[in-house]
Image (cartoon, rainbow, N blue to C red):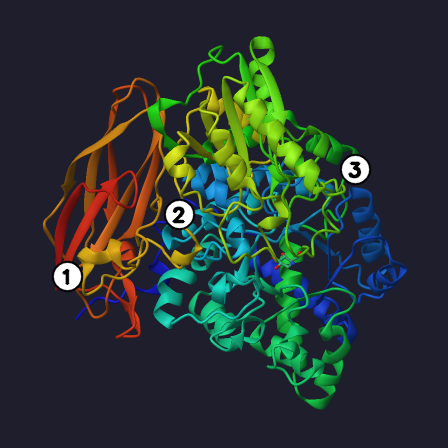
Amino acid sequence: MALICTLSALMTAAASGQAPSAAPPDDKAVEKRVNALLDQMTLEEKIGQLSQLFVFSSSSQVDEEVAKGQLGSLLFVTDPASINRLQRIAVEKSRLHIPLIFGFDVIHGFRTIFPVPIAMAASWDPSMVTGAQTIAAKEASAVGINWSFAPMLDIARDPRWGRIVEGAGEDPWLGSAMAAAQVRGFQGEHIGSPDHVLACMKHFAGYGAAEGGRDYDASNIPEALLQNVYLRPFHAAVEAGVGSAMSAYMDLNDVPATGNRWLLHDVLREDWRFQGFVVSDANAVRSLAAHGFAKDQPDAAARALDAGVDMEMAIGSTAYSQNLAAAVSSGRITVQQIEAADRAILGMKVRLGLFEHPYVDEARAARVLATPEHRTAARLAAERSAVLLRNEGRLLPLGKGAYRKIAVVGPLADSPMDTLGSWAFQEDIAETVTVLAGLRNKVGSQAQIGFAPGVEIGRKFPSPFDQLSRAKSRAPWTPEQAKDELKKAVDLAGASDLTILVLGETQLMSGEAASRESLALPGNQEQLLEAVAATGKPVALVLLNGRPLDIRWASQHIPAILEAWYPGTQGGNAIANLLFGDAVPGGKLPVTWPRNADQVPIYYAHNTTQSPESQGRRYWDEESTPLYPFGYGLSYSTFSFSNLQVSQAELKIGQTVEVTAEVENTGASTADEVAQIYIHQRYGSASRPVRELKGFERITLAAHEKKTVRFSLGCNELSYWSAAKKAWVEEPARFDVWVGADSTASLRGSFTITQ
Ligand code: NOJ
């Protein structure tokens, strides 16, 4: 009989060492304080705490509602003076002096913009990610923001989905490690740690499986896939102590996530023992009616509360504030249900210290936002997040002084907003270093740098975020101008010794409401690329984007390709360092890179099939292998893996096996490698993926240095949710294990689990 691991024991390895370690706040004192408040609160005030509104500019209506205790939280207020002003109304004018909690999308930085989350996942460096979110939390909390709507933990296996940029990619193990790392960065040692904020795991759950990659479309996820893949990072975040969760927009297996009691109650609170509170995504409670799930707004409000949504996020007004009082009068919901939601929210306000320290020091806020070390951290993060996809003939690193005339070409090369990526609202655009600026900083007077955008690119349909973006808009080129600009760029490349092409997607081509049906380089960038390559001069391609793109032609004809993602505030300096060898690429793909969109969905952890040897030939008109596998990335040095040892050939269910392997830097310079361990269970009560990541370690090795990497495989790693048993199982079976540099690693061992 297989030993069934308890759910709470699962994935602890991914989150190991990452749970809050400082003394937790005194639960009894929190409870006492919350009870004392609840004793004095009217029903209207109790419902008020459950409402959160967007505030884009000061509004007398919001002021009034705050003063009457009709609002518990505001989002999108970001300047400390406005936050203090609103907080003063709550604390000094409202009857019970309950402070507001201010939320904001602090996704990859506040003033200092770090690389986008998919990029930070590509670092395979959880401690770096914790550091980045610690800085983001410090800046946000300095202005009075107490709560970040991050991390986004949606597994995404379809790069057409725009929000793939906001998560950690396709894999539950890597996703869990990044989840725990971010929670720790945002919240610190415990909720209420100074200079930190409350984290909010989102979007619970299954949003990344939107059909067709179309944002907001329904997700249909079989239970085993949900348990083994989509829910894993969320569980890791709960284990790491995350204090809040955001319910997703879409239907999950026909039940909208925001009205899904199984998800928000049975899984989250009962199975996982989540202690925080749940906020809906924006307007998602009202949308329960749009989904054809709730009959009307009163029904939507009651069903969201029943399902477990404690706070409703909305624009203008909430369905909760308008309908819950009547629902109590009619007996549709109970006061106890409202109080349960209040307890979770008020408890968090107490833990965050908002009652003791409701205001911020505006002068200090300005100083914190200007901290130079934050910019240095952002540069290092961008360097660690870049993935070198190709380097034929070792074109990179570029020799300093080797090229007298350098052409920098491409529509993104000198575009600050497009260097930052989505969810950047508080950056200082003037200090954002574009690739062109970074290269100029780097080469100084050693080379002459010319720039030409070559083409212009844009979305076919506008983005709902256009109004919020500060990207400069200008009249589009006429057909003649477009022709001239293309020619100028190609001429510049022809007249230079080297071209650095910067192509990809603009800021709003990736992110929310930014799904696409193709993965082609947008606009005429492919034409520009091929024309520049035809000059015969050396070309290095730098990609700025939030998803894998169709770069099949480039992957055969452009010698050097560096995936820089949206690298953030210091992106240009980081890229210049990487191109010239002052930093060495060590990032690895957190997502399988398809040849084109027609291959999607494609991910490494697919199940074994009846004809495994034909895996790469499933289509007759294109390879069915990806262009680059999950976990892949090159370095300026080379590495070899050898001597894989498994501590025992046979073990019993519940025992742990140790796997070691040697990694050697076989090149001539210091560089990083990410050692990755994959397993495969050969048979069992259900089919298992061909490979599954179960551990990784990013290491730095000097030239010719050798290191032994060690991994433990125990119940956490060897269990899975069996569709046949409808339970977590660890089964007697033979296992393969690989250690290497990506998901195609060939260094193999094996072991057997017996009863
Ligand atoms: C909608 C998005 O889906 C969510 O991720 C975000 O946190 C909220 N809006 C608030 O901006």
The mark that comes first in sequence, 1 or 2, is 2
Residue farthest to the bottom, as pictured: 330
Percent coordinates x, y for residue 645 in the rendering: 14, 40
* Amino acid type, residue under disc 1 in the picture: Ala
Q: Find residue 362 and name its label.
A: 3
* Amino acid type, residue under disc 3 in the picture: Glu
Image height of 712 relative to 487, above or below: below
Marker count (numbered) = 3
Mark 2 = which residue? 593
Mark 1 = which residue? 733
User: In front of the other: label 1 or label 2?
Assistant: 2
Question: How far apart are labels 1 and 2 at the CA level?
Answer: 31 Å
Percent coordinates x, y for residue 750 in the rendering: 13, 49
> Is 281 left, or right, of 367 in this rendering?
left
Image height of 366 relative to 80, above or below: above
Q: Are marks 1 and 2 in contact (CB under 8 Å)?
A: no
Question: How far apart are labels 1 and 3 at the CA level?
Answer: 61 Å
